[in-house]
Image (cartoon, rainbow, N blue to C red):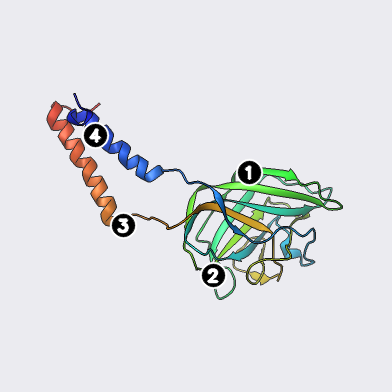
Amino acid sequence: MSALRHPQKRLRVATAALWTLISSPATATLIFDNGPPDGTTNSYGGDTLVAYAVAEDFVLPTSAKLTGAQFWTVESETSVWDGTLIWYIFGDNGGKPKAAPIVSGAGVNVTKALTGRIPHIENVYSFSFLRPISVLGGKPYWFGLTLGSRYDQIVWETTSLGFGSGAWVSIDAKLDNWADSHAPLAFQLTGEPGPVHVPEPATWGMLVAALITAALAAVAGSGRLPA
């Protein structure tokens, strides 16, 4: 007998189709590069990532879903990172980050590795976002970071290239006291390029209605609730 003729299988097929639409995995590719690390740091203390929030601006040429990021640091021999990595995506407020982030969270799958560059102790950090973040093309945003909770010498490394106006810093990561550090910082964003597909409410309503219809048909066909 065809699976679609069996009421319970019909319900499972409809449920699986909806789940496939919702949870299709993103393919991570490099979609924004603010420039490679140049082995130096800005003298302005705000580029220190520990107990500070530091944000750099970016604009994507086309809409995309962000899935992760990579950045470089210069650290002292006595630097101690407590393992905490908080990221932010801010909207633009006239050339600086807005006080409240659009979205933020803790980095997942975080890796830290020495690059071997001399004489600095340079590290590269990579991490993923818990869920893909939809970003519109041609619109300014800010990518922000905070590491740990102790004051220590872990500094977001500069780049000789860089997009836009350079980084802004918030002391104690309060996010309402941004100051301009003027430094372009080295980082990359990965994600799935292309149009951002966000189903309209009417589309979600149709999908839910289809599941309800399938469920009612399964109940009517079997005379009992589907297992």
**Mark 4 neighbour class, 10 Å CA radius: few under 14, some 14 to 19, many 20 or more:** many
Q: Which residue does the numbered mark 3 point to in the structure image?
A: 200
Q: Residue at x 39, y 55 (%)?
A: 197
Please give the count of numbered marks on the rendered protein. Answer: 4
Instruction: Give the residue type at disc 3.
Output: Glu
Instruction: Give the residue type at disc 2.
Output: Asp
Whole-Å distance between the Cαs marked 3 and 2?
25 Å
The residue lying furthest to the bottom in this view is 94
Q: In the drawing, does residue 109 fall left or right of residue 45?
A: left
Q: Residue at x 78, y 51 (%)?
A: 122
Whole-Å distance between the Cαs marked 1 and 3?
34 Å
Q: Of label 1 and label 4, which has the lower sequence position? A: 4
Instruction: Give the residue type at disc 1.
Output: Val
Q: Is residue 71 above or below residue 159?
A: above
Instruction: Give the residue type at disc 4.
Output: Leu
Q: Of label 2 and label 4, which has the lower sequence position? A: 4
- Where is the C terminus found, in terms of image quarters? top left
Q: Residue at x 53, y 61 (%)?
A: 101
**Mark 1 neighbour class, 10 Å CA radius: few under 14, some 14 to 19, many 20 or more:** some
**Mark 3 neighbour class, 10 Å CA radius: few under 14, some 14 to 19, many 20 or more:** few
Do residues under tags 3 and 2 come within 8 Å of each other at their CB atoms? Answer: no
Do residues under tags 1 and 4 come within 8 Å of each other at their CB atoms? Answer: no
Q: Which residue does the numbered mark 2 point to in the structure image?
A: 92
Q: Of label 4 and label 3, which has the lower sequence position? A: 4
Q: Nearer the viewer, mark 3 or mark 2?
A: 3
What secondary structure is marked by label 1? strand
**Mark 2 neighbour class, 10 Å CA radius: few under 14, some 14 to 19, many 20 or more:** some
Q: Which residue does the numbered mark 1 point to in the structure image?
A: 110
Whole-Å distance between the Cαs marked 4 and 3?
23 Å
Evaluate whether residue 70 shows in this view. yes
Q: Which residue does the numbered mark 4 point to in the structure image?
A: 11
In the image, residue 107 lies at what x, y percent? Answer: 59, 47
